Image (tube, helix red, strand yellow):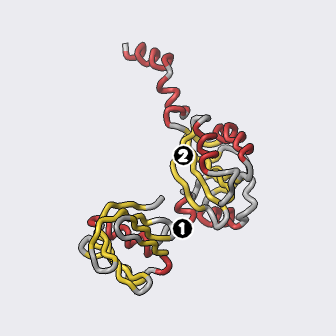
Amino acid sequence: MGLEAKCEARIGGRWQPVSALLEEKEIVCRGPVRLRAPLDQLKNIRADKGVLSFSHGGEDVALRLGDQATRWATRIANPPSRLDKLGVKAGLRVVTIGLTDDAAFCDEARSRGAVVMTRGTADLVFFQITAARELSRLAALARSIAPAGAIWVLWPKGGKDLREGHVRDAALALGLVDVKVVSFSEVLSGLKLVIRKALRPAARKAASPAVGARARKKEA
């Protein structure tokens, strides 16, 4: 997920108001002046007194970002890795299902210290699909993750019959909510789904009238 700011930009010598977005691979500015600058083409990146400056295509660009200038400069210079974006950490239990388009991912996860499994209760499930009908498996997958776990649904980029909206609609119908979208790889997009907090086991137990009655009786 990118960073966004309403700010002033100096592009072509004048300061003008823009909406600036730091995305995974580029900076985009929209407004009276427009800019689309791939991060790997930026030079002389620096933050000073609330201003982010860089060169792109032989032109100097500056964004008045205030307190966010240093954060943007750091993100550009040190972009998060794929595992960082996906939340893969040491000790987490990871299950992959149908992940045929990225054989290296399991090795990456193991190198981070995650426990890669083929079944069992997981903290993270990576579920690759090629057709909308496969989303029917989400109900079972939701029961297989830890209460605070997540399902990453992965699907091919550029398809017409399978899009982010199909995944989101199927998830909402099951009490799952989407919290993040990423480019998983050059060929796969990914949407992170979690169980709505009110539907997690601990929340259901706390809201149970029987539990509440027992608690009141004990207090009495």
From this viewpoint, which residue is outermost toward the left? 49
Regarding residue 124, the answer to whether it shows in the image is no
Mark 1 near mark 2, Cβ–Cβ under 8 Å?
Answer: no
Of marks 1 and 2, the one in the foreground: 2
Q: Which disc number belongs to residue 178?
A: 2
Residue 158 lies in quadrant: bottom right
**Residue 72 location (% of width, % of height):** 38, 69
Q: Residue at x 46, y 16 (%)?
A: 214
Query: Is residue 69 in view?
Result: yes
> In this orientation, which residue lies closer to the viewer: 106 or 25?
25
Residue 101 figure quarter:
bottom right
Q: Residues within 10 Å of mark 1 (few under 14, many from 20)?
A: few
Q: Amino acid at mark 1?
A: Ser
Identity of the residue drawn at 45% across and 19% down = 212
From this view, report whether residue 106 is shown above or below residue 52: above
Q: Residue at x 66, y 43 (%)?
A: 121
Q: Which residue is mark 1?
A: 81
Q: Relative to residue 148, is residue 74 depicted above or below?
A: below
Q: How many marks?
A: 2
Q: Position of residue 67 (x, y in %)?
A: 28, 65
| Residue at the extreme front of the image, as rendered | 32
Label 1 – label 2 distance at C-alpha: 21 Å
Instruction: Give, as a three-letter code, the residue at label 2.
Output: Asp
Please tell me whether mark 2 sits on a helix, a strand or a loop: strand
Q: Quadrant of residue 13?
A: bottom left
Q: Earlier in the sequence, mark 1 or mark 2?
A: 1
- x, y (%) of residue 144? 66, 41
